[in-house]
Amino acid sequence: MGQSSYGFVPRITTKYILAKTKVQPQEWIIYTDIDEFVSYPVHLRDSIDIMQSKQIYPIPGWFVDHITLDGSLPPITGFPSIFEQFPLGCHLSANWLKACPRKIMLCRAHVKVNAPHDTAYGVRFDICPIGQPQDYQVHHFK
């Protein structure tokens, strides 16, 4: 296995990471990157309770890219809030970069999820525990 241009071995799997961190198969994982915030239509604990009762194990979210009013890439500061610094919500990654707009936001550890976290294998991930699909958002800051 060679290294990628990012300096890591791309074949490190979620299964390997979970084993190293001792996450149990029944535990829940929130998949998020450092430049993302996730939002649910109800409190996270309520989402998990509903998912467990309906045996829904992954829940996908939909990217909302956040950019500045003028499209610039300023340094991020502690004030005002990041949502105020990047106030425009759009679908830049999906429309311009042709990236998949979906991301698995929350999932049981036993479910296999691919590296970009946009697909879960062996389970349905098109069911919302509550609300509509667009209510599950992954706020991505550009």
Image (cartoon, grey):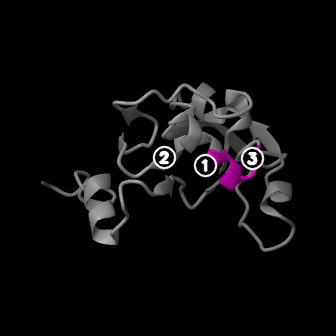
Nearer to us of marks 2 and 1 is 1
**Front-most of residues 67 and 135:** 135
Local packing at callout 1 (Cα closer than 10 Å; few below 14, some 14-19, many 20+) is: many
Nearer to us of marks 2 and 3 is 2
Please indicate whether residue 125 sits to the left or right of residue 53 in the image: left
Name the amino acid, label 1.
Ile
What residue range appears in magenta? 42-49
Q: Is residue 7 visible?
A: no
The residue positioned farthest toward the left in the image shown: 1
Q: Position of residue 82 (x, y in %)?
A: 78, 61
Verify CB contact (< 8 Å) between mark 1 and mark 3: no
- Quadrant location of residue 64? top right
Please indicate whether residue 129 sits to the left or right of residue 69 in the image: left
In this view, 124 is above or below 1: above
Q: Tell me the tag on residue 102.
A: none
Q: Tell me the tag on residue 48.
A: 1
The N terminus: image quadrant: bottom left
Q: Residue at x 46, y 36 (%)?
A: 118
| Disc 3 secondary structure class | strand
Name the amino acid, label 2.
Cys
Q: Report the Cα–Cα distance between label 1 and label 3.
A: 30 Å
- Quadrant location of residue 54? top right
Q: Tell whether position 110 is magenta.
A: no
Q: Tell me the tag on residue 107.
A: 2
**Front-most of residues 90 and 53:** 53
Local packing at callout 2 (Cα closer than 10 Å; few below 14, some 14-19, many 20+) is: many
Local packing at callout 3 (Cα closer than 10 Å; few below 14, some 14-19, many 20+) is: many
| Disc 2 secondary structure class | strand
Q: Position of residue 3 (x, y in %)?
A: 21, 58
Of the numbered discs 2 and 1, the one sitting upstream in the chain is 1
Q: Tell me the tag on residue 67.
A: 3
Q: Position of residue 95 (x, y in %)?
A: 62, 26
